[in-house]
Image (cartoon, grey):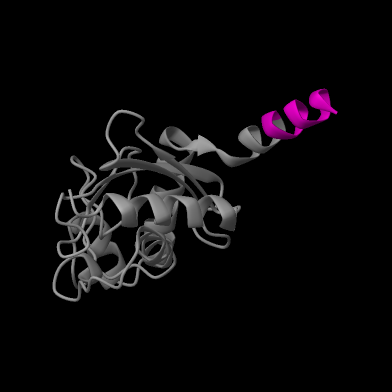
Amino acid sequence: MICRPRLMKEQNDLQKLNDPTMIIQVNESDILIWYVYLFGPEETPFENGIFKIKVSIPPNYPVKAPTLHFQTRIFHPNVHMDTGEVCLEVLTQKWEPRWTIESIIRAVRLMLQEPNPDSPLNCDAANLLRANDLIGYKSIAQYYTSKYAIDKHEYTNKVNAKEKKNQ
């Protein structure tokens, strides 16, 4: 597997980065499976949630792009409602080996901030945006976030309580 050294470096770089908007977990028995817990961006319908994303890395990475699937249900035009598949040009037509797992996750975060209704996997969400029904789109997206995502405030309170206990 030619990608192993690169993946180990990327994992190490991400741990050093200590980005508060994401938590990365690499499957202990398979380095080609990563899980990302992505904090919803502020000022979006996703801001109060944490979303689990499965990153499946092909053995010939970085020549071939990984695939991403939301494990947390989410209402977004670029995420398939049933499978969680993510539609991003950077994972298909615009893929280049210089991209990293970190850059892909940042692209997903940007996708949450700037949905693209012209490349939908969820036509209901896309149609609301195309019709300029932002209230409808945001209401449904917020509902899905509150129902399915990990509550960001609850998580933060648990982490803070644990840190305080360990002091």
Quick check: 86 above or below 82? below
In percent of width and height, residue 158 lies at: 68, 29
Q: Nearer the viewer, residue 66 or 131?
A: 66
> Is residue 131 a member of the stretch shown in magenta?
no
In percent of width and height, residue 118 lies at: 20, 73
Identity of the residue drawn at 38% across and 49% down = 8
Identity of the residue drawn at 30% across and 28% down = 29
Residue lying farthest to the right in this orientation? 167
The rendered magenta stretch, by its main secondary structure, is classed as helix
Q: Nearer the viewer, residue 166 or 76?
A: 166
User: To which quarter of the image does residue 56 belong?
Assistant: top left
Q: Nearer the viewer, residue 56 or 47?
A: 56
In percent of width and height, residue 87 lies at: 21, 61
Quick check: 37 above or below 165? below
Q: Assign the C terminus to one quadrant of the image.
A: top right
- Magenta residues? 158-167
User: To which quarter of the image does residue 99 belong?
Assistant: bottom left
Q: Nearer the viewer, residue 166 or 162?
A: 166
In percent of width and height, residue 36 lies at: 41, 45
Quick check: 37 above or below 107? above
- Judge from the rendering whether residue 64 lies leftward or rightward of residue 50; answer left or right: left
Labels in figure, total: 0
Identity of the residue drawn at 44% across and 34% down = 147
- Judge from the rendering whether residue 49 lies leftward or rightward of residue 93; answer left or right: right
- Judge from the rendering whether residue 25 lies leftward or rightward of residue 54; answer left or right: right
